[in-house]
Image: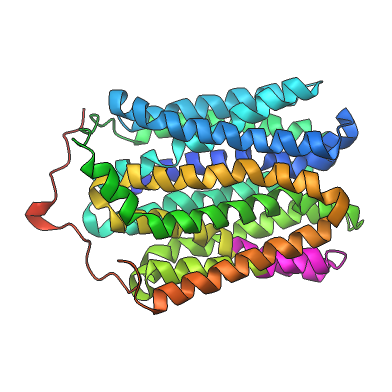
Amino acid sequence: MTLSPAARVGVAGAAVVGVAFGMARYAYGLTLPDIRRDLGLSELVLGLVASATFAGYLAGLLLTGPLATRRGSRAPTTVGGVCGALGAVIVTVAQSPWLLAVGAVLAGSAGGWVWAPYSDIVTRTVSLGQQPRALAIITTGTSGGLVALGGLSALAALGSWRLVWGGIALAAVAAAVVNLRLVPKTRPAPRPDGRGGTSSLVRALRVPAAYSVVYFAVIVVYFTYAADVIQRDELPTAAVPALYAAIGVTGVVAVTTGAIAQRLGSVRVAALCLMMVAAALALLGLASDSLAVTSASACIFGVGYMTGSAVLAVWTAELVPDRAGAAFTGCLVVGALTSVAAPAVAGAVIPGLGLGMLLVLTAAVSLLSGVALMWHGSSGGGPSATPNREPQCTGSTRPAPPPLR
């Protein structure tokens, strides 16, 4: 059976993003308690390594644009697969904090290399009507990665945390092969002339960029410390892999993000996601000793997390359809900066505040930001405050996609 362009790109993108985000990017938080015991690292060192992984992610984001300009949008996705596999192998064999940091940074960079280029790949190879759905499917690949990560964690409970990272290395190789076989190679897109393009891009992305600052900070705190807080409260060993699997399973609903955003507006969807993440953080911080409450937190977080990332891809493509990759990258870079700072700040304040209080305060930030964003959407602020019936660039005003190689 011959797959349509949308299906080919969707399947490949979901596989690559699933490994890079659902597995490589968040495996550090999952294995953090075992790493602490095995290597004897302090909270500050663990926080710094976590921040370093997001610095790697930021580096990948910044280098993606120049590489895509020279070699086409598929090239960064291939580099991301290599980084994910190599970084996971290094972490698997690491015996020192320095080697652990190198591997974690490489693995963390995979997400920066692979996610944003798919916005350009989709807008240049998929029909206009199928683009929101394809973008949502690609982003929701993270759910599958989280389910697989939960499975690896359960397996590792019988042996070593290093089995998790070994499994990620194999999955990264497999996803890279699928990507090369299914995604067409595109010609590099022409770079916009003058400064007007950049200034207009900044103006268009003010609201989604502000959303990215809060969204990525609170997401990082949850993923970095969820496993740790559960183990500190001495819940069953299976609770940690079950939490990650629950996040992945409930996050599958994000495949409908494109349709929901067209009805409600991307701003409102983003605001609701921040509120859901706030509820998940508050539950984890206030009652993490309860298995039922922890399960509820994971399920709520899965929906908010996955839909929140999918709506950002859809939102930026709506606002700047002819520069979807650059728009998405810009918001991801802003979010990456807060992702770098959040774990280091958390590691520094936990000894004084306590982990539970940190989670509650982070929930408050997420909730207040969601309320402010909802007010912005209800007041009619921003191009996507109301449902988008049609793309902003249609017909002859949209340049034809470059031919495939």
Residue drawn 33% across the image and 58% down it: 132
Residue drawn 17% across the image and 36% down it: 402
Furthest residue toward right: 234
Quadrant for the C terminus in the image: top left
* Residue 2 seen in render: no
Instruction: Write the start and end of the magenta stretch as one range.
Output: 279-302
The answer to whether residue 280 is magenta is: yes
Report whether 16 appears left or right of 350.
left
Report whether 273 appears left or right of 126.
right
Foreground of the two, 390 or 23:
390
The answer to whether residue 16 is magenta is: no
Residue drawn 56% across the image and 39% down it: 19
Q: Give how far across and how far down residue 249 sits, in percent.
A: 61, 59
Foreground of the two, 133 or 224:
224
Quadrant for the N terminus in the image: top left
Q: Give how far across and how far down residue 247 sits, in percent.
A: 64, 58
Q: How is the image coloured?
A: rainbow
Q: Give how far across and how far down residue 89 sits, in percent.
A: 67, 23
Q: Give how far across and how far down residue 205 sits, in percent.
A: 36, 54
Q: Does residue 81 lie above or below 350 as drawn? A: above
Residue drawn 50% across the image and 29% down it: 81
Furthest residue toward left: 396
Q: Splitting the image into 4 quarters, where does residue 194 fall?
A: top left
* Residue 245 seen in render: yes
How many numbered badges does the structure rendering display?
Answer: 0
Dominant SS in magenta: helix
Q: Splitting the image into 4 quarters, where does residue 353 fall?
A: bottom right
